[in-house]
């Protein structure tokens, strides 16, 4: 296995990389043997709910929505939902969308609200 550096650097995974698989038990060794892994970054949107908790939406992944009772749990659930979403796309042979070309901008308006 080659080293990993922050910021989206690539890591080559081989089927002999038992340490990697021990840290990531959900991953299927057969599917990722020899595939190059990289860090993907996604923006998430957390909406505080009136009663309790947070709903999380991942805009770059249509339909990827989850919930957490606390802020920390919502972040953790978002990571898991994104991983499952990407795994499903790969299983279906579809491209994995990224958030790389997204520009975020806040527009201010005056309104009677």
Image: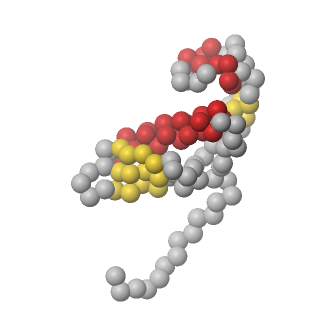
**Quarter where residue 2 is shown:** top right
* Residue 73 in sight from this viewpoint: yes
Residue 74 pos. (x, y %): 39, 44
* Residue 7 in sight from this viewpoint: no
Residue drawn at x 48%, y 36% is 80
13 horizontally vs 71: left or right: right
Residue 76 pos. (x, y %): 43, 39
Looking at this view, is 50 or 105 the one in front? 50
Residue drawn at x 59%, y 53% is 60
45 horizontally vs 7: left or right: left
Q: How many marks?
A: 0
Taking 97 as reference, is 91 above or below it? above
Residue 27 pos. (x, y %): 58, 24
Residue drawn at x 57%, y 50% is 61
Quadrant (top left/top right/bottom left/bottom right) for the C terminus? bottom left
Residue 33 pos. (x, y %): 71, 21
Taking 19 as reference, is 47 above or below it? below
Quadrant (top left/top right/bottom left/bottom right) for the N terminus? top right
Looking at this view, is 56 or 41 the one in front? 56
Residue drawn at x 52%, y 76% is 107
**Quarter where residue 9 is shown:** top right
Taking 109 as reference, is 25 above or below it? above
Taking 29 as reference, is 37 above or below it? below
Residue found at the far left of this picture: 51
């Amino acid at each position: 296995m080659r080293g990993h550096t922050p910021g989206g650097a690539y890591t080559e995974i081989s089927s002999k990389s038992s340490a990697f698989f021990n840290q990531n038990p959900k991953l299927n060794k057969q599917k990722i043997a020899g595939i190059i892994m990289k860090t993907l970054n996604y923006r998430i949107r957390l909406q505080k709910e009136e009663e309790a908790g947070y709903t999380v939406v991942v805009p770059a992944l249509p339909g990827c929505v989850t919930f957490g009772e606390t802020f920390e749990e919502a972040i953790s659930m978002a990571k898991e939902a994104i991983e499952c979403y990407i795994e499903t796309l790969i299983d279906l042979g579809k491209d994995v969308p990224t958030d790389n070309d997204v520009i975020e901008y806040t527009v201010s308006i005056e309104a009677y609200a």
